[in-house]
Amino acid sequence: MLKKAIYLSCAAALISMSGAYAQTPAPAQPGNPDVRQDNRDIRRDNRDIRKDRREIAKDQADVRKDRRELRQDMQKGDKSAAAAERRDIRHDQRDLRRDEKDLRKDKAQRVGDRQDRREDRQGK
């Protein structure tokens, strides 16, 4: 009977200690504190860069199409349609510039994240 009580009390102590241990955060490895987060950031930046490149290609195709339509409208002498095409071209070019700016920003962030990862790996 006493043996069972000792076993039960030891088991209860182990369970309570393991519960407390499970709630504490895992200690950071000495030279590797947040390399995983840096890798996630780099993957996110790469995904953003791919998305921006697709949008830029789409905007460039839109501008080419609108310029072609503008030339056709000018040859027909349709001034109102030509004015509408010019507005559409300006809108597409503005969108293209915005996407190019976003692409540059994402590339700069990726460079910074790579530098952070390099420093974390070296333990700085």
Image (cartoon, rainbow, N blue to C red):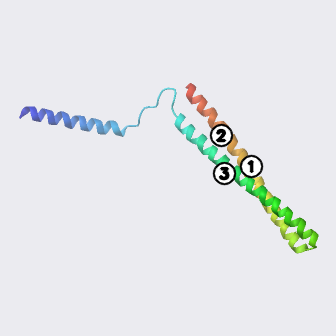
Q: CA distance from mark 1 to mark 3?
A: 13 Å
Disc 2 or 1, which lies upstream in sequence?
A: 1
Q: Which mark is residue 51?
A: 3
**Label 3 sits on what residue type?**
Lys
Disc 1 or 3, which lies upstream in sequence?
A: 3
Callout 3: few (<14), some (14-19), or many (20+) C-alpha neighbours within 10 Å? few
- Residue 91 position, x and y percent, is 79, 62
Q: Residue at x 73, y 56 (%)?
A: 58
- Residue 38 position, x and y percent, is 57, 37
Q: Residue at x 16, y 35 (%)?
A: 9
Q: Is residue 37 left or right of residue 17?
A: right
Q: Residue at x 25, y 38 (%)?
A: 16
The image quadrant of residue 44 is: top right
Residue beneath label 1, please?
Answer: 101
The image quadrant of residue 3 is: top left
Q: Which secondary structure, mark 3?
A: helix
Disc 3 or 2, which lies upstream in sequence?
A: 3
Residue beneath label 2, please?
Answer: 110
Q: Residue at x 84, y 70 (%)?
A: 84
**Label 2 sits on what residue type?**
Arg
Q: Quadrant of the C terminus?
A: top right
Q: CA distance from mark 2 to mark 1?
A: 14 Å
Q: Quadrant of the N terminus?
A: top left
Q: Which secondary structure, mark 2?
A: helix
**Label 1 sits on what residue type?**
Lys
